[in-house]
Image: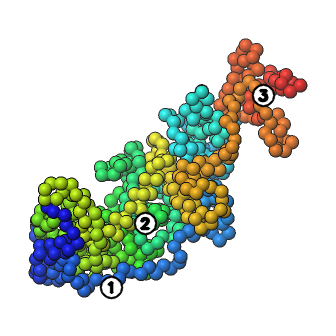
Amino acid sequence: RGARGRGVGRAAANAAQPQHLPGRGRARGRGRGRGRGRGAAYDSLRGIDDPDGGGPANFPAFQPASEPGLKLPADFVLGSEVDLFKLYFSEEVVGKIVDYTNAYGRANIDRKKSYKNIHGGWTETNADEMYRFIGLLLHMAWHPLPQLSDFWNTSSLYNGNYARLMIGSYKRFQALLCFLKVVDHTAEQPGDRLRKVRYLYDTFRVKTRSLFKPGQHIAIDERMIRCKGHSVMRQYMPAKPTKWGFKAFAVCDSASAILWDFELYTGQANTEGGLAHDVVMRLANGLENQQHVIFTDNFYTSAKLATSLQSKNIHLVGTVRTNRQGFPNVMKNDTKQFERQAERGTIRYVRDNTILYEQWRDKRVVSMLSTAHRGNEYVLVNRHGKDAEGQHVQLELTQPKVVSDYNKAMGGVDSFDQMAETYRTLRRTRKTWKSMFYDMIDIAAVNCYRMFNIWMAAHPGAITRSTRNPHNSFQEHLIRQLTGIAINEPPPKRLFSGAPGQPPANQPAAALMHTPKYDVQKKRCVLCVQEGKVRQVVTYCKICMVFLHVGPRDCFDRYHVQNFP
């Protein structure tokens, strides 16, 4: 097989392909759902030198209802990374999560007695603590450690005091993780498989759609949310990097790889046009009459879907399976022969009214469907191969333009997943719905990073950041802003030690008073330890950050008299 140039490819396409083949008849084999029935009129098989009279004159011109790009609120002022993040997890949303968590904690604290406070009840959380809780989850993904408790480890190779500054004790973090709720637990609908995340799921999807307007090219593909817990929704997809978990159908802008919408798969349900058809039609709501082009893989692509989308002035481009209903018999019946006999770079196509079916012989046959391309459009590509003498050479082949455009636009969801996997918030949990909650945090973080870079490009110099602004730098700034840890703050000393602490700078006089506070976890009284006795206590000084007895033993007053005469 010699190197194939431009002219050779066209000539081979015409010579190798039969012309004026009969129209499509009834499909062989099990006829139900196969083929298009008797009398289906297809054009004859063509090569790239043949005109495509039924195709569009040009690629569809984009007619957006509004300018694509960021759709930030009118009164929004971007001052830092956390401002974008709070558009997804707004104060209203986090306030609801706080209310649901507190209500669930109050109702079920007796089931987890180790998380009770000094008064025997649930310690109420608030919006500030919940934001710091989310920030700590992001920190755990950004700076992973072997096990969860290591984030509170204060030995020489760790610095667990940062986790204490973010959220407090390890037991407090466990309590929030245990009683976390994103829905009203008293109003869950028994038949709803997403009842554990329904409020946040519906609200979050509205946020993703409203904050960004995609461009003309849109990719729809599956993505997996890793989970090995017991759930009827769990799927096994061996071809995906994440093989076990929840399946989500995602819509991404091809140019920016920003996730615009997604739908969790809850299990097989009654569908009118098939699962793949109905999912794409639901996700395409809001894209009508703007000449969008949706790119899909062969799980979704079909003639029925292409026709349904065309009724809404939306175009479809994707790889297609040869056993799909509507695929031309003239191609399907000799695909294997075409793969064996045709040389690399050979192109053939069939026009069925507004739908183009095209096959390209690369190392294997690639079958495509498009409502936005012409069959005789092609580009030149380079491939590695061997010449007639078996030497490695670089080949110049003809490639259908539909394949070239597909390769450029289809990677939106994969690009998004690749970035989300870099700092995956997901942690092992028995409550499978929490995997979905963690995934929404990742979606917000990745979308915010993409949106922040778009905003910075439109407003150079507005915020001081490095020109490249890598993902890890963005993640670091976001974590600091959520948890309240300054970028130049020195490593904290070991908390709750016997040494007196230093009062924080720039604090009001009332805040500088040495007053006792309660903690959910008992610690040793430092004064009793100095006196050779081991007694545990739940009270500590909020300035010195040491545990001391308050009351009859009067360790609190004696300690401060000794250290602050």
For disc 3, the marked residue is 500
The nearer-to-camera label among 2 and 1 is 1
For disc 2, the marked residue is 254
Disc 2 is placed on an element classified as loop
Q: Residues within 10 Å of mark 1 (few under 14, many from 20)?
A: few
Residue farthest to the top?
532
Give the residue displayed 60% in from the left and 51% down from the top: 478
User: In the rendered view of the protein, which quadrant contains the N terminus?
Assistant: bottom left
Disc 3 is placed on an element classified as loop
Kind of residue at badge 1:
Ala
Q: Which quarter of the figure has residue 173?
A: top right
Q: Is residue 219 above or below residue 289?
A: above
For disc 1, the marked residue is 57
Give the residue displayed 43% in from the left and 66% down from the top: 254
* Chain-order first, disc 1 or disc 3: 1
x then y, percent, for residue 294: 38, 71
* Chain-order first, disc 3 or disc 2: 2
Alpha-carbon span between mark 3 and mark 2: 57 Å
x then y, percent, for residue 472: 54, 49
Disc 1 is placed on an element classified as loop
Alpha-carbon span between mark 1 and mark 3: 80 Å
User: In the rendered view of the protein, which quadrant contains the C terminus?
Assistant: top right
